[in-house]
Amino acid sequence: MKLTGFELRRVAMPLVAPFRTSFGTQVERDILLLRALTDQAEGWGECVTLPDPVYSSEYVDGAVDVLRRHLIPALARAAVDGAVAVGSALEPYRGHRMAKAALEMAVLDAELRSIGRSWARELGAVHDRVPCGVSVGIQDSIDQLLAVVGGYVEAGYVRIKLKIEPGWDIEPVRAVRRQFGDDLPLQVDANAAYSLSDARHLAQLDQFGLWLIEQPLAEDDLLGHADLARIVRTPICLDESIVSAQSAAAAIRLGATAVINIKPGRVGGYLEARRIHDLARANGVPVWCGGMIESGLGRAANVALAALPGFTLPGDVSASDRFYRQDLTEPFVMVDGHLAVPDRPGLGVTPDPVLLARLTRWQELIEF
Ligand code: NPG
């Protein structure tokens, strides 16, 4: 396969409702898409950066800049012929993992479509459907939270994750437990909003039988998470802190994480995501697939990843209608709390050209 260029495209997808986390509120998803152009099939990549560097240091304009200025020219120079070669061609460039992941995804999709192999088969999926968890944003009131959670429980989601922050933690969790009972699979996500001095406060969550507390402390605070894990009984799960297989190995060795949230964008791509899965599995650490409000393209790839054997906990892989009235691709519809793993070549889904054109705010073609 010969790469001949990339199309960069920014699409604005309205959300069905505002999504509030400890780092801000989103009302639309500003998605950077990459289309790999080759002498065979074309491939799609989705970059999961946010408009502002508030989840991690990456952001959409920064990704566009590094892709145009450094990463895409590096692939052109290296005459990259497949996804495995993308990693080595981009290796000299530090950081920018979300931008790198999007490039790798586009090239891998083109490669797999060319040879007629599905994403699931390529990664080593062992299930044909995956259970759906849902992430619930911070709400204006406890009553509103109970109504929103009730809707998702009714829809069939098999696990609920509540976003928390200082001032919105113990009482919302208590209220959800009281209303929906002790058997509801429940976990919380702090997006790094606490510090180690909050350890005693966070230990109050132990009474609610949560599956895990996700990323309570800062991204670079592995030692703090290891200390916290000795004070809080609820398992700690790292998200932002795990940026590579190497950081995953360090976190496991230090006892900073008992569970890992794997997000391919955050770790530089699906191939590194699979390496983290393999490492965690070898160490008996359960993993689950995180979500970054992807369109159907990223969702397709995540659903396939979540079907690997070490993904033993339900991921943030929700149906398309959790965030979007109309998805960019064929919609992912939840049946019995599960999504079907796509089995057609590559990602197995394709953007709707008319909708894509309507939602596109900017585009640029880079030919080699
Ligand atoms: O289901 O796609 C989803 C969203 C899950 O809560 C979710 N994602 O912090 O994990 C997170 C959060 C997120 C969304 C982070 C978008 C960054 C961008």
Image (tube, rainbow, N blue to C red):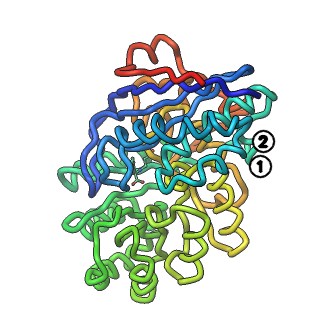
Name the residue located 64 percent from the left edge and 46 percent from the top edge: 89
- Marking on residue 65: none
Labels 2 & 1 near each other (Cβ < 8 A): yes
- Marking on residue 121: 2
Q: Is residue 241 left or right of residue 13?
A: right
Q: Is residue 181 left or right of residue 299?
A: left
Helix, strand or loop at label 2? It is helix
Residue 299, horizontal then vertical, whole percent: 55, 38
Q: Along the line of sight, which residue is nearer the eye, 310 or 177?
A: 310
**Amino acid type, callout 2:** Arg
Residue 176 in sight:
yes
Helix, strand or loop at label 1? It is loop
The residue carrying mark 1 is 124
Q: Looking at the picture, does residue 210 appear above or below residue 35?
A: below
Q: What is the CA distance from the residue labelled 2 to the residue labelled 1?
A: 5 Å
Residue 298 in sight:
no
Q: Is residue 230 left or right of residue 108?
A: left
Cβ of disc 1 within 8 Å of ligand 1? no
Residue 5, horizontal then vertical, whole percent: 59, 25
Name the residue located 55 percent from the left edge and 52 percent from the top edge: 268
Q: Along the line of sight, which residue is nearer the eye, 362 or 77?
A: 77
Q: Quadrant of the N terminus?
A: top right
Picture quarter containing residue 113?
top right
Name the residue at the right extreme: 115
Picture quarter containing residue 222?
bottom left
Label 1 Cα neighbours within 10 Å, binned few <14 / some 14-19 / many ≥20:
some
Residue 142, horizontal then vertical, whole percent: 22, 56
Cβ of disc 2 within 8 Å of ligand 1? no
Name the residue located 40 percent from the left edge and 71 percent from the top edge: 220
Q: How many marks?
A: 2
